[in-house]
Image (spheres, rainbow, N blue to C red):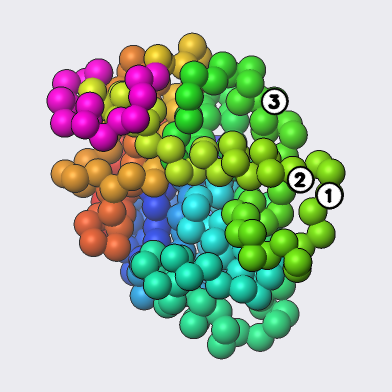
């Protein structure tokens, strides 16, 4: 019997909540688990979280900005100061430094397989949102092109990394937007009647023309409930796991569980 397709919000190293919400949903190895990214940082159990997820056969994440910072560290050995000091990277880095080199290389290989965007028959999964009025075909072209490794570029890494002609600045400038940009979410919220969203958006964006549902994380939602907007084909599921709740959603029914 085929299992369900489930998708989880930003985990942020909240291992106990991860196990709890999977238990509440009666998750089994027959189920497929997708993720909108940001597996690490902020929470207190990054290694436990990573070990558990690396052990799941049917786990399919996309790259979040925090995962990108971690990937850059694993490739270069250099720590982004903003990540370490202000975005929870200190707990993750300090825990990973205690692991042996073989484990770190296994982790790097695993994260390098995270796509920036994942396209299914009925879904588009991306961490932050759609940063502009992209067509579905343009999104497909980005997926086919792949991404640089690491994706997060810090120019202090230039002497270390060997950037090829295919890895020009523009790769980093526009691809990173897919896990930073919040305007698509704020436009969807504004269209749903949340007037305060207008103050947060930088520009107005029309809904993408698609039959697929766009699943995103990245932006903690104030009332700890998923945002569903049919006009923008959007479901946002980051409910602030490290200070609020971790949300798991059935992608077919939109039934959800929280811990």
User: Residue 182, position in %: x, y?
Assistant: 38, 36
Viewed as shown, does residue 150 lie left or right of 232?
Answer: right
Local SS, label 2? loop
The magenta stretch spans residue 128: no
The magenta stretch spans residue 202: yes
Local SS, label 1? loop
Measure the C-alpha gap from mark 3 to mark 1. Answer: 20 Å
The magenta-colored residue range is 191-205
First along the sequence among labels 2 and 3: 3
Quarter residue 165 falls in:
top right
Instruction: Please identify the quadrant where the C terminus is shown.
Output: bottom left
Viewed as shown, does residue 79 lie left or right of 251?
Answer: right
Q: Which residue is mark 2?
A: 167
User: Residue 73, position in %: x, y?
Assistant: 61, 69
Instruction: Please identify the quadrant where the N terminus is shown.
Output: top right
- Front: mark 3 or 1: 1
Asked if 183 appears above or below 40 in the picture, the reply is above
Quarter residue 254 falls in:
top left
Q: Which residue is mark 1?
A: 164
Local SS, label 3? helix
User: Residue 13, position in %: x, y?
Assistant: 41, 66
Asked if 226 appears above or below 155 in the picture, the reply is above
Q: Is residue 257 visible?
A: no
Query: Residue 170 versus residue 150: which sits nearer the camera?
Result: 170
Measure the C-alpha gap from mark 2 to mark 3. Answer: 16 Å
Q: Count the numbered circles shown.
A: 3
First along the sequence among labels 3 and 1: 3
Dominant secondary structure, magenta: loop
Q: Is residue 193 visible?
A: yes
Q: Residue at x 17, y 27 (%)?
A: 194
Q: Which residue is mark 3?
A: 141
Q: Which mark is residue 28?
A: none
């Amino acid at each position: 019997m085929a299992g369900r397709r489930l998708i989880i919000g930003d985990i942020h190293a909240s291992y106990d909540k991860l196990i709890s919400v999977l238990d509440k949903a009666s998750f089994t190895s027959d189920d497929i688990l997708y993720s909108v990214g940001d597996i690490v940082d902020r929470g207190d159990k990054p290694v436990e979280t990573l070990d558990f997820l690396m052990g799941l056969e049917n786990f399919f994440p996309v790259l979040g900005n925090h995962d990108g910072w971690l990937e850059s560290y694993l490739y270069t050995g250099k720590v982004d100061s903003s990540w370490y000091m202000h975005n929870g990277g200190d707990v993750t880095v300090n825990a990973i430094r205690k692991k042996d080199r073989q484990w770190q290389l296994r982790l790097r290989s695993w994260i390098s397989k995270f796509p920036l965007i994942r396209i299914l028959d009925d879904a588009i999964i991306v961490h932050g949102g759609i940063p502009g009025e992209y067509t579905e075909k343009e999104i497909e072209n980005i997926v086919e092109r792949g991404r640089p490794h690491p994706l997060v570029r810090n120019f202090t890494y230039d002497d270390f990394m060997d950037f090829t002609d295919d890895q020009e600045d523009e790769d980093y400038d526009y691809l990173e937007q897919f896990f930073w940009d919040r305007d698509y979410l704020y436009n969807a919220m504004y269209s749903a009647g949340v007037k305060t969203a207008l103050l947060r958006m930088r520009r107005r964006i029309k809904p993408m023309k698609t039959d697929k549902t766009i699943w995103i994380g990245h932006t903690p939602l104030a009332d700890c409930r998923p945002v569903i907007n049919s006009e923008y084909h959007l479901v946002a599921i980051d409910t602030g796991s490290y200070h609020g709740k971790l949300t798991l959603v059935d992608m077919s029914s939109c039934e959800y569980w929280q811990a």
